[in-house]
């Protein structure tokens, strides 16, 4: 046997060994981090997609019907979830196992891609492991609702892998496979529209053919890129046809007139949050102090590697620039949604995390003055820390999911045990739930038997999504729900999911004698407070008839005496520019992001006030970011002399240089109603630095 044959066999064996090591390490780590929690229950929006699987009969309509009223078109992702329900039913193991498998395959694809263009299997293994165990990726894979992100990333990486194989092997079948999987990725989630740009970036850095210039390379590639853009155009055209527009949320849309203000607000926050979440991961290990230690360690680690580079920054390796380019391209869909990264940053950064892993392995180059063993050791230390964070976050998620399971079981037992007390058609109102409970009604109807579909489970202090069924229309409870339904989120021929705002609970009890009220305690336990609500309703009727509480309490800010009663408590001051802007009200200046004024001491029974009216003017702004579109009213009571908690209401503000009158319906807010005697008000007019004028603030009693 010749030396060349022996050498070739040795290389193949080494390659197989590296693949086995990569597979094994990634699998063991994922099973260690995720395996013990595969039976955890569902959470929040998960129930929405469970209910789709349960209530949608025409599965193929996902591909051609606007079921989400112009919001989303992600048919393949929802298709997979519905099929998952038909196979797994309500067994959480089936869903979490699929998501974990998809995440595992994505990690293997990261390993394979990096091995393909760097020809360094050790780098591929490290990158695959980093992607597999990073908290951002782990927290994306634990939520059933994030399936669209994981599946879209799988098809995106598969597309690039086949395109890379096409460039290396020059076989047309690889190119056709790349086009096929690109189409699948578009159908998973709209953020995958950046895929053609990723293909161009890969081809320019790692294309198989050699050219004398980047221009010649680009000209050669145009004929290969055009089909991907044509495929994208077909997808966007079909999406427009189905949705009747681009779809998406209002705050994700960019207009020509507001482009520069939008970019100046979002871009700095976007870059900060993206790299903060990627490096620091935005999770707690054990305590704030140790979080700071970890943040400091990671910052020093990356600065040390970059500063130790021996040459100029422009001579950094291809991997570094390709990883950076990957991140910049994949965050393009987030360019107008930077504030979402503070709420649910995990799923939005799942695909960009591939670029972060490429950046990490680029720092293992010998061009750094730090020895490779040292930098590899630091990377392994980082991996261990990420594993610990992921395990802790999994524990937190499992406890929150188990809480939902206890809530469902508790309510089911309560209703079954008291059929005469809770007849079909009853409407249950819940207080004290957290902000993730807006799918409360959907949760119950997704997992409980059909006999529970006649009940409605509504949050009494925040909006709720509910399922309504056409065959139950005409019942008393359905008619009462129609009065508070705000908008339809999903609909087909038989069912609809609608958003309802909490009604005035005291009025709800008067119009519906069978209304049931509960206050959530903890650990799946509730306390019925129907009698307390009934007593409040009776007391309000008595107070409404008292003449002493029928007068309007108002402060006119054009009067120095009234203005002087309000304390400019935080980040608010009288503006030095006091030119007349139309009325004699003084110009106030908010100097920070948390300005507020505190009113004088008062004694007003909460049950006598219907609304607080605020007249205010803000300067014209071309673009007002979503986090800045609301003002807030806080209040103190005789029994609770603190700000915050649930004692506040928000109201939308308009910045157009005109005076607007804002009516805040505190009288229908249950926490205002239960407050007893209101002793003080606090107004947070805006949440950003600006000038403003306040005309007046009034407490309006019932009957005015």
Image: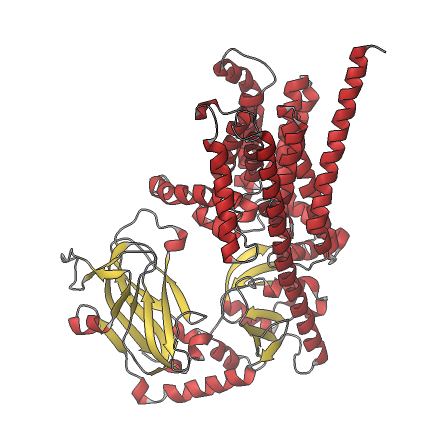
* Residue 503 image position (x, y, % from top left): 48, 72
Q: In the displayed orientation, state which residue is furthest to the right.
A: 1
User: Considering depth in this image, is 526 or 116 the residue closer to the camera?
Assistant: 116
| Quarter placement of the C terminus | bottom left
**Residue closest to the far left:** 579
Q: Is residue 257 visible?
A: no
Q: From the viewer's perspective, is 330 left or right of 451? A: left
Could you say which quadrant of the image residue 185 lies in?
Answer: top right
Residue 209 quadrant? top right
For the residue pair 371 and 401, the one nearer the viewer reads as 371
Note whether 587 is above or below 125 in the view shown. below
Q: Is residue 241 left or right of residue 633?
A: right
Q: Nearer the viewer, residue 200 or 288?
A: 288
User: Can you give x and y, in whole percent of width and height, for residue 4 in the image?
Assistant: 78, 12
How many numbered discs, if any?
Answer: 0
- Estimate the x, y position of residue 284 in percent, counting from the top left: 54, 55
User: Residue at the location (75% across, 56% down)?
Assistant: 89
Above or below for 682 versus 58: below
From the image, which quarter does the N terminus lie in?
A: top right
Q: Residue at x 77, y 17 (%)?
A: 8
Residue at (38% x, 77% y) in the render: 641
In terms of image quadrants, where is residue 433? bottom right
């Amino acid at each position: 046997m010749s030396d060349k044959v022996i050498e070739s066999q040795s290389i193949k064996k080494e390659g197989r060994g590296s693949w086995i090591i990569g597979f094994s390490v990634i699998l063991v780590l994922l099973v260690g981090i995720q395996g013990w929690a595969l039976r955890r229950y569902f959470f929040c929006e998960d129930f929405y997609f469970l209910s789709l699987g349960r209530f949608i009969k025409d599965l193929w309509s996902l591909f051609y019907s606007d079921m989400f009223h112009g919001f989303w078109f992600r048919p393949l992702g929802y298709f997979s979830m519905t099929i998952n329900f038909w196979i797994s039913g309500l067994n959480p193991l089936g869903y979490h196992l699929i998501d974990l498998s998809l995440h595992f395959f994505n990690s293997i694809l990261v390993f394979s891609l990096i091995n393909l263009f760097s020809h360094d299997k050790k780098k591929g293994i490290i990158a695959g492991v980093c992607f597999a165990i990073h908290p951002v990726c782990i927290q994306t894979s634990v939520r059933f609702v994030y399936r669209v992100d994981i599946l879209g990333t799988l098809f995106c990486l598969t597309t690039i892998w086949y395109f890379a194989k096409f460039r290396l092997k020059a076989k047309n079948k690889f190119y056709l496979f790349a086009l096929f999987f690109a189409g699948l990725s578009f159908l998973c989630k709209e953020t995958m529209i950046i895929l053609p740009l990723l293909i161009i970036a890969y081809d320019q850095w790692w294309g198989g053919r050699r050219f004398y210039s980047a221009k010649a390379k680009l000209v050669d590639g145009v004929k290969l890129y055009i089909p991907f853009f044509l495929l994208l155009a077909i997808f966007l055209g079909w999406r427009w046809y189905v949705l009747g527009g681009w779809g998406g949320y209002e705050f994700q849309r960019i207009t020509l007139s507001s482009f520069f203000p939008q970019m100046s607000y979002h871009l700095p926050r976007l870059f900060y949050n993206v790299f903060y979440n990627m490096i620091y991961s935005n999770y707690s290990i054990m305590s704030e102090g140790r979080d700071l230690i970890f943040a400091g360690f990671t910052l020093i680690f990356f600065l040390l590697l970059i500063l130790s580079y021996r040459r100029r920054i422009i001579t950094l390796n291809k991997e570094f620039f390709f990883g950076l380019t990957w991140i910049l391209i994949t965050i393009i869909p987030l360019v107008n949604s930077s504030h979402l990264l503070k709420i649910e940053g995990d799923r939005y950064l799942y695909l960009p995390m591939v670029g972060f892993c490429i950046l990490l392995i680029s720092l293992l180059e010998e061009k750094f003055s730090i020895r490779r063993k040292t930098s590899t050791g630091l990377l392994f230390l980082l991996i261990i820390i990420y594993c610990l964070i992921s395990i802790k976050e999994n524990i937190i998620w499992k406890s929150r999911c188990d809480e939902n399971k206890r809530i469902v079981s508790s309510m089911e037992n309560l209703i079954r045990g008291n059929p005469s007390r809770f007849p079909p058609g009853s409407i249950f109102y819940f207080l004290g739930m957290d902000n993730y409970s807006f799918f409360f009604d959907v949760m119950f109807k997704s997992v409980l038997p059909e006999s529970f579909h006649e009940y409605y489970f509504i949050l009494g202090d925040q909006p709720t999504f509910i399922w309504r069924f056409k065959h139950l229309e005409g019942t008393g409870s359905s008619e009462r729900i129609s009065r508070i339904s705000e908008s339809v989120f999903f609909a087909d021929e038989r069912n609809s999911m609608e958003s309802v705002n909490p009604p005035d609970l005291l009025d709800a009890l008067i119009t519906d004698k069978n209304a049931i009220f509960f206050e959530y305690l903890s650990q799946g336990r509730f306390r019925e407070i129907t009698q307390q609500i009934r007593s409040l309703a009776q007391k309000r009727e008595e107070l409404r008839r008292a003449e002493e509480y029928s007068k309007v309490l108002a402060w006119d800010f054009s009067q120095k005496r009234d203005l002087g009663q309000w304390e400019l408590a935080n980040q608010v001051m009288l503006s030095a520019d006091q030119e007349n802007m139309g009325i004699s009200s003084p110009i106030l200046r908010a100097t920070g992001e948390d300005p507020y004024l505190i009113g004088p001491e008062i004694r007003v029974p909460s049950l006598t006030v219907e609304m607080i009216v605020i007249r205010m003017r803000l300067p014209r702004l071309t673009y007002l970011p979503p986090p800045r579109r609301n003002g807030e009213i806080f209040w103190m009571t005789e029994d609770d002399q603190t700000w915050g908690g649930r004692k506040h209401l928000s109201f939308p503000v308009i910045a157009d240089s005109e005076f607007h009158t804002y009516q805040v319906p505190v009288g229908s807010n249950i926490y205002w109603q239960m407050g007893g005697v209101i002793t003080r008000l606090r107004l947070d007019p805006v949440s950003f630095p600006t000038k403003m004028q306040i005309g007046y603030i009034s407490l309006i009693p019932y009957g005015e």
